[in-house]
Image (cartoon, rainbow, N blue to C red):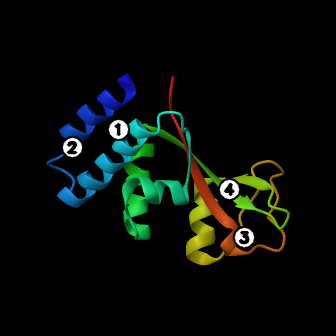
Amino acid sequence: MMLLIEQRILLDEMKDIFPEEDIFLFNNVLDFIQNNYDKNYYPINVLRQAAGCESDSDLLKLVRYFCGAHSKLFNITYCYYDFDGEEIPISAECYYNALISDISPISLLSGREIDDFDVNNISFYCILNVK
């Protein structure tokens, strides 16, 4: 898969910038993708499994790297799941404000604040950016 070869080259270019532990996690994700080439949907639990990471900090590092301008391996969607389990897309800013300050996010669909906000229902997932 050409995408993975390109990603490994990009990661090799960054090996002097990131700590060795981060490079290990990032390589774990690339290995997981290679071994699960039919998968393109990566919710939080699958990202944790792919990287072999436990901490939120490590998860955030790998998402920042793989969704960032350098890699662009994943496209990220921030969302809120209402009480019916329906996904409501929200912005990255609303996601972080909700987590950090417990501020009710604004729906990208309606432009309105989400009613009966529960911070436990906020999430994100990544989609493999295959062209």
Q: CA distance from mark 2 to mark 3?
A: 37 Å
Vertical order, 87 against 129 (above or below): below
> Three-letter amino acid code at disc 4?
Cys
**Disc 3 designates what residue?**
104
Mark sitting earlier along the chain (1/2):
2
Residue at image point 40% right, 69% down: 54
> Three-letter amino acid code at disc 1?
His
> Three-letter amino acid code at disc 3?
Ser
Mark sitting earlier along the chain (2/4):
2
Q: CA distance from mark 1 to mark 2?
A: 10 Å
Instruction: Confirm or deny contact between disc 4 and disc 1 (CB under 8 A).
Output: no
Q: Which quadrant of the rendered structure holds the N terminus?
A: top left
Q: Is residue 55 left or right of residue 131?
A: left
Question: Which is nearer the eye, 3 or 36?
Answer: 36
Mark sitting earlier along the chain (3/1):
1
Q: CA distance from mark 3 to mark 4?
A: 12 Å
Question: In which image quadrant can residue 115 be found?
Answer: bottom right
Question: In which image quadrant can residue 101 be found?
Answer: bottom right
Q: Is residue 19 visible?
A: no
Q: Is residue 11 left or right of residue 116?
A: left
Position of residue 77 measured from the top left corner of the image (x, y, whole percent) = 61, 48
Instruction: Confirm or deny contact between disc 1 and disc 2 (CB under 8 A).
Output: yes
**Disc 2 designates what residue?**
14
Position of residue 127 measured from the top left corner of the image (x, y, whole percent) = 56, 41
Q: CA distance from mark 3 to mark 1?
A: 31 Å
Q: Residues within 10 Å of mark 1 (few under 14, many from 20)?
A: few
Instruction: Confirm or deny contact between disc 2 and disc 3 (CB under 8 A).
Output: no
**Disc 1 designates what residue?**
70
Q: CA distance from mark 2 to mark 4?
A: 30 Å
Total numbered circles = 4
> Three-letter amino acid code at disc 2?
Met
